[in-house]
Image (cartoon, grey):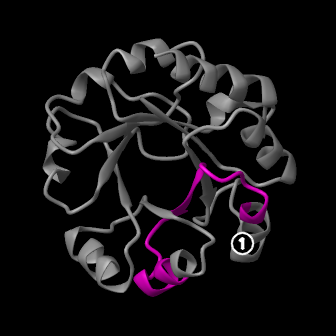
Amino acid sequence: MKIKICGLSRPEDIEYVNASPPDYAGFVFARSRRQVTPERAAELRAGLSDGIVPVGVFRDESAETVAALYESGVIAAVQLHGDEDAEYIRALRALCGAPVIKAVRVTSAGDAALWDDCGADYLLLDSGGGTGTPFDWSLIGSVVTPYFIAGGVNLGNIDEAAALRPFGVDVSSGAETGGLKDRGKIRELVEYVRRR
């Protein structure tokens, strides 16, 4: 199982993930309290250890803008949280070779499987994005595309998430204390995944 720590916005956050390296680190370009500018993301990316894949998180951004960030090396994968569909993903693939993670809001059985043919490399199953609240994981059902579980994953429920055998878990608020990334929580989360 892989782990992504999302919402890095400070030099300290980079220090924390470098010390306990997850597989992926997320920079949020969509509107959020964790949002970073492309310039800020480039500065943070420069300090990120080799081996940690920097992921850009977008919501309804133009494919050209996303592709430019990938081609510049600021990000090495793309996570889409808006109304992007299979057509958008095809257009993005025509512009660049970025691996694509498509976020899917799961509110009923079968929601995730509807996106199996969207052309994404991975799905990210969530409660709606940015709420820090888990959805009902029993609704995941049968999904062909490798997927991340996101939304409220933390030290208290990561074992339950891992039991579903996802490709990975995506952690943001669950790696924070007082709204800021927490070195100890990141270390514990990554160590848990490495023991699996």
Which residue: 61% across, 26% down? 190
For numbered disc 1, what is the local secondary structure? loop
Q: Nearer the viewer, residue 50 or 20?
A: 50
Residues 196 and 6: in front is 196
Residue positioned 43% across, 72% down in the render = 60
Q: Looking at the image, is 133 positioned above or below residue 85?
A: above
Q: Position of residue 53 (x, y in %)?
A: 56, 53
Q: Nearer the viewer, residue 122 or 47?
A: 47
Which residue is disc 1 drawn over?
Answer: 37
Q: Where residue 178 sits: x, y (%)?
A: 81, 32
Which kind of residue does numbered mark 1 sit on? Thr
Q: Nearer the viewer, residue 132 or 5?
A: 5
Quadrant in which the N terminus is drawn: top left
Is residue 167 covered in magenta?
Answer: no
Estimate the x, y position of residue 132 in percent, counting from the top left.
56, 35
Q: Is residue 83 left or right of residue 39?
A: left
Q: Is 50 on the left or on the right of 139, as rendered?
A: right
- Does 82 sit left or right of 118 as displayed? right
Q: In the image, what residue occupies the spot 57% across and 17% down? A: 192
Image-quadrant location for residue 69: bottom right
Q: Which residues are magenta?
A: 45-68
Q: From the top left corner, tell me how far across and down residue 148 is, in percent.
A: 38, 38
